Every structure is written in structure tokens, then in C-alpha cells.
Amino acid sequence: MKIPLIFLALAVGMISSTSCYGHDDDLSSKVVEWVKEGKVLPLDTIMQRYESRLKGRLLDIEVEKKHDRIIYELEILRDDGIVYEIKIDAKTGEWLKEKVD
């Protein structure tokens, strides 16, 4: 399950907005709730933790739920002109995967 999120308010820790587009509004609402409850890390925490590895322009943020694991998927356009897809565990902040998109 994949939900693109267009509110960068979540990315900077301001989670009052729940506007989003995608296939499952229920999951996006749950993510906002989980951040408020401390069950998953806010994206600003992730962005700060991996600041040196996430350099570039943030193009897209998505949330996936796979096998009871919540994953932030970020698309970053780096200075080399290549878009990288990065997956990070939303609960632990663990860097899971990076690939060229």
C-alpha cells in the first residue's frame, strides 16, 4: 500500500494539516495520528538525522505499509541530476534502501 503525501507540514513536524491525495485516506490519517502519539518519527526528525545523505531537492514523500511496517519513501533530486528513492523505517528511523529511480 502506497500513499503519496503532499503536505510538507508533516515533513517539518507541523502535523496539523491532513490534506493529501492517494488511495487510502485512512492510512494518511493514521500516520498523522501515529506521529502525534510518538509511534512513528516525524519526517523532520528523519530529515535531520540523515541531513548529509538527503542533500538535494525533495520531490515526493510517500508512506507505505508493508508487512506491518510503516516506511517513509522519499524521492530526492540530487545535484548530479539523478532522482534517488530512499526508504526509511518510520518507527525506528532505520535507513532501509536507496536506489536510483
Image (spheres, rainbow, N blue to C red):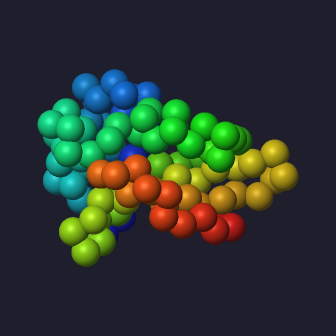
Query: Residue 82: x, y in percent?
Result: 77, 58
Most extreme residue toward the bottom, as rendered?
67
Q: Residue at x 55, y 59 (%)?
A: 86
**In which quadrant will I find the C terminus?**
bottom right
Q: Is residue 7 visible?
A: no
Q: Nearer the viewer, residue 9 or 54?
A: 54
Residue 97, how many percent across, how many down? 54, 66
In the rendered image, residue 28, in percent from the top left (x then y), is placed at: 25, 49
Which residue occupies the foreground of this view, 74 or 98?
A: 98
Q: How many marks overall?
A: 0
Residue at x 38%, y 57% (from the top left corner): 89
* Residue 84 in the image: above or below residue 77: below
Residue 45 appears in view: yes
Q: Is residue 57 above or below residue 83?
A: above
Question: Considering the image in quadrants, where does the N terminus appear?
Answer: bottom left
On screen, 89 above or below 40? below
* Residue 56, horizontal then vertical, whole percent: 70, 41
Residue appearing at x 70%, y 58% in the figure: 83
Query: What residue is shown at x 51% (from left), y 39% (from top)?
Result: 49
Residue 51 lies left or right of residue 95; in this view the side is right
Left or right: 19, with 80 as reference point: left
| Image quadrant in which you'd find residue 63 | bottom left
Q: Residue furthest right?
A: 80
Q: From the viewer's perspective, is 84 left or right of 60?
A: right
